[in-house]
Image: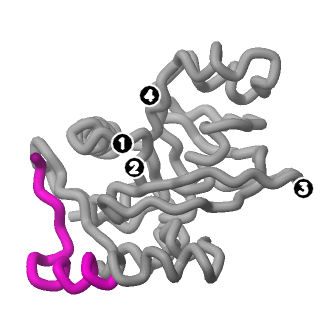
Amino acid sequence: MLFKHNKHLPVVTAGADVLKQVAKPVDKITQEVRAFVQEMLRSMRDFEGIGLAAPQVGSSLRLVVIEIPREELHNRGKNATSGEKLLLPQMPIAMVNPRIVERSQNLAEREEGCLSVPSIYAPVVRPAEVTVEFTSLDGKLIKAHCGGLLARCIQHELDHLDGLLFTDRLSPAAAETVASELNALIDSGAKNGFTRVRK
């Protein structure tokens, strides 16, 4: 069975094998997949996140959920991209088999954290805008050009589908500043099965 049906899915932490794997495509959007998405959303909200990838709850599938506050569209104002105008009003959203098909040359740096790397934050440089393609839960193929926090969240979550954490994207100097905390997290995780329980 691909999915674990619990009311609150545990979030796995850095060091877990599933976070290092390239996730497999979702073959078909079934009722089971839709139910799993709802469980992912509950877990993401439990831990006060704005995005969660299936590998973070132990399922190596190309599936993510995102819930950025809708007021982000207002905050972006005239800088909002067509993808932000399309997706932000629909939050929360699920992306099935998402892929980034275009990245801007312009880069932006912003501090990131991760539910799988709790209490560790560091600046990450990423493309300022990306174009993402994904299938919605109702089977529609969507292509959206996104900027701002949405673009960053998409890149962060899709990294999880390729076995990458945000800490893998850090500059050598930034990586050095969090190295001891990250090693302590991995050591601690090894003692409890690399899982976070709900607070």
Label 2 crowd (10 A; few <14 / some 14-19 / many >=20): many
Q: Earlier in the sequence, mark 3 or mark 1?
A: 1
- Please give the residue where the numbered disc 2 appears in the rendered image: 52
Mark 1–mark 2 CB contact (< 8 Å) = yes
- Residue at coordinates 65% horizontally, 76% vertically from top-left? 171
Q: What residue does disc 4 label?
A: 92
Residue 61: x, y in percent?
42, 62
Which segment did they paint magenta?
183-199
The mark tally for this picture is 4
Distance in Å between CA atoms under marks 3 and 1: 28 Å
Q: Is residue 3 above or below residue 18?
A: above
Depth check, front residue: 180 or 149: 180
The colour scheme used here is one colour
Q: In the displayed structure, does residue 173 sit left or right of residue 37?
A: right
Give the distance between the C-alpha atoms of the residues marked 4 and 2, in whole angstroms. 11 Å
Mark 4 is on which residue type? Pro
Residue 85 drawn above or below residue 97: above
Helix, strand or loop under label 3: loop
Q: Earlier in the sequence, mark 4 or mark 1?
A: 1
Using the numbered discs, state the Cα–Cα distance from disc 4 to disc 1 in whole angstroms: 12 Å
Name the residue type under label 2: Leu
Q: Residue visible at 43% across and 44% down?
A: 51
- Checking the image for residue 105, the label placed there is 3
Q: Position of residue 126 (x, y in %)?
A: 71, 58
* Sequence order check, earlier mark of 2 and 3: 2
Task: Say what amino acid the circle numbered 1 marks.
Answer: Gly
Q: Which residue is mark 1?
A: 49
